[in-house]
Image (spheres, rainbow, N blue to C red):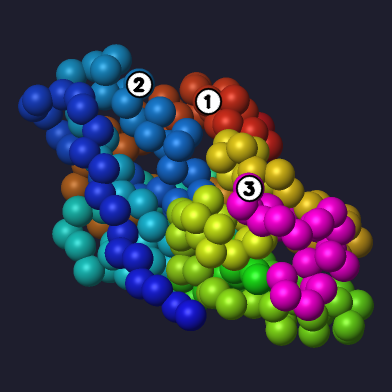
Amino acid sequence: MKKLLFCLVLLIPGAASGADIYWYVAAGMLRPGTEIAQLYNSAQDKHNVILITGGSGQLISKIRASNQADLYLPASSKFLHQAEKYALVQNSQPLLRMWPVFAISPKSKKNIETMEDLSADGVLLAMGNSETMALGEIYQQIEPKLPLDLAKGLHRNTRIDSINIQQTVSYLHQGTVDAGLLFDSVAATHGLRYVEIPAAWNVATQAYLVELKCSKEPEATAEFVAFIRAHKDIFRTHGFDVGP
């Protein structure tokens, strides 16, 4: 079962005049991204941040098709490199580290406490599309590390390849699946219990702040990047591991 979810544009209340800054934020970082954009818009009246969210890969397609793109926050280095391949990147800097986990649906009546429980008969899983979201690409790195029987069980139980994190979160809260692949910070933010992937198998991901060559407001964008760095504790309050 696969469903399509388009990118979402969030019009954050703020300045009525001045330059608009279009910030493309991977869906897993939507909550802290929204909070930072609101804070910036309310703190000054020169610029206005407009936030656009979706899967990291979806956003690259949107950036390439749009004439309005200033800043990009993908959830893994794969999509940074993809943006570089398309000659979109002016500057980039690491911001966050995130760890994949399996979040458990509050509606699931199954006893899921371990990775082995996730591979049991009858458990329904949501994974991720590797072309549109970082978690799908990262799981491709995790899967070869898993014991063969466990990997086969997880593959058998996969019912949905989500195209972004918000889709997986929705399926979990709806009870459409019993468990789904999320980042630890996203699961915590949404109040979801989760099963950790053992360190020997897991792969951390790095999220980057990427200033784009197509920006029509490079100076305003650089100013906003400095604001994000100065307020990176907002990411910490949402459970993210923030770099230097």
For this orientation, the residue located farthest to the top is 43
**Residue at position x 30%, y 64% in the image:** 6
- Which residue does the numbered mark 3 point to in the structure image? 106
Q: Position of residue 236 (x, y in %)?
A: 61, 28
Q: Mark number for residue 234?
A: 1
Q: Is residue 243 visible?
A: no
* Secondary structure beneath label 2: helix
Q: Position of residue 52 (x, y in %)?
A: 30, 49
Q: Within the magenta stretch, is there residue 133?
A: no
Rendered image quadrant of residue 156: bottom right
Q: Which residues are magenta?
A: 98-123
- Which residue does the numbered mark 2 point to in the structure image? 39
**Residue at position x 51%, y 60% in the image:** 171
Closer to the chain start, of discs 3 and 1, is 3
**Residue at position x 84%, y 65% in the image:** 117
Closer to the chain start, of discs 3 and 2, is 2
Three-letter amino acid code at the position of disc 2: Leu
Query: Magenta part mainly helix, strand or loop?
Result: loop
* Secondary structure beneath label 3: loop
Three-letter amino acid code at the position of disc 1: Ile
Q: CA distance from mark 3 to mark 2?
A: 32 Å
Q: Are marks 1 and 2 in contact (CB under 8 Å)?
A: yes
Three-letter amino acid code at the position of disc 3: Pro
**Above or below — where is 186 with respect to 141?**
above
Q: CA distance from mark 3 to mark 1?
A: 26 Å
Mark 3 neighbour class, 10 Å CA radius: few under 14, some 14 to 19, many 20 or more = some
Q: Left or right: 173 with respect to 40?
A: right
Q: CA distance from mark 1 to mark 2?
A: 10 Å
Q: Nearer the viewer, residue 122 or 195?
A: 122
Marker count (numbered): 3
Q: Nearer the viewer, residue 185 or 205?
A: 185
Q: Left or right: 208 with respect to 61?
A: right
